[in-house]
């Protein structure tokens, strides 16, 4: 996976990314970007000062929130956007990222049963993997 050449809003739009304004709790993360293809989706967000901890690094809670959004989006696409909830989520922190960086996640659906979707993904800042995540989403049915 290669880093994006430019991550300003105009460059992202020109590269085919779409802005998504989340609602509810996920709005705490701010504007999310959705790119890639349905076969290889990628999501991203711009880390800001409000996402950092006392040491100036993106807080683990922000990384976990993004992992839940990113992998959950992959699960949602696999279930044709049926209603679902996160049943299990594990995140391993590998490296740090700072404010001003564009954080991206690559969800990959591993397995799907009638009611469960298993997803894993890497969370990256540029060429650096900052976290590895895997989770299970429970499909509840149509909205």
Image (cartoon, helix red, strand yellow):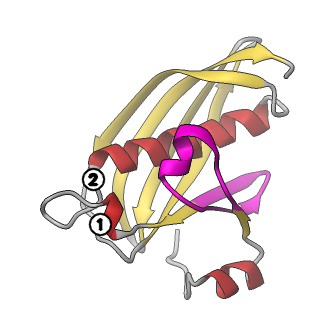
Residue behind mark 1: 97
Q: Is residue 16 left or right of residue 90?
A: right
Identify the secondary structure beneath mark 1.
loop
The residue furthest front is 24
x and y percentages locating residue 77 in the rendered image:
77, 39
Instruction: Give the quarter of the figure containing the C terminus.
Output: top right
Quadrant for residue 86, please give it: top right
x and y percentages locating residue 29 in the rendered image:
48, 53
**Magenta highlight on residue 35:** yes
Identify the secondary structure beneath mark 2.
loop
Residue at x-position 48% and y-position 50%: 28
Q: Are marks 1 and 2 in contact (CB under 8 Å)?
A: no
Q: Residues within 10 Å of mark 1 (few under 14, many from 20)?
A: many
Residue behind mark 2: 59
x and y percentages locating residue 69 in the rendered image:
56, 43
Residue at x-position 13% and y-position 63%: 55
Marked residue nearer the N-terminal end (1 or 2): 2
Residue at x-position 64% and y-position 50%: 22
Labelled disc at residue 37:
none
Residue at x-position 70% and y-position 55%: 40
**Magenta highlight on residue 8:** no
Q: Relative to 47, say whether 110 is above or below.
A: above
The residue furthest left is 55
Q: Is residue 51 left or right of residue 11?
A: left
Highlighted magenta segment, given as a residue range: 20-43
């Amino acid at each position: 996976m290669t880093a994006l050449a430019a991550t300003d809003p105009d460059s992202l739009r020109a590269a085919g990314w779409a802005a998504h304004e989340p609602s509810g709790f996920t709005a705490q993360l701010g504007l999310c970007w959705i790119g890639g293809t349905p076969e290889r989706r990628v999501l991203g967000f711009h880390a800001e000062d409000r996402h950092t901890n006392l040491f100036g690094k993106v807080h683990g809670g922000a990384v976990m929130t993004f992992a839940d959004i990113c992998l959950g989006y992959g699960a949602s696409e696999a279930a044709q956007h049926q209603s679902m909830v996160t049943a299990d989520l594990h995140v391993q922190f590998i490296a740090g990222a700072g404010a001003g960086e564009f954080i991206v996640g690559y969800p990959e659906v591993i397995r799907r049963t009638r009611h469960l979707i298993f997803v894993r993904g890497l969370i990256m800042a540029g060429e650096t993997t900052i976290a590895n995540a895997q989770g299970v989403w429970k499909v509840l049915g149509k909205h």
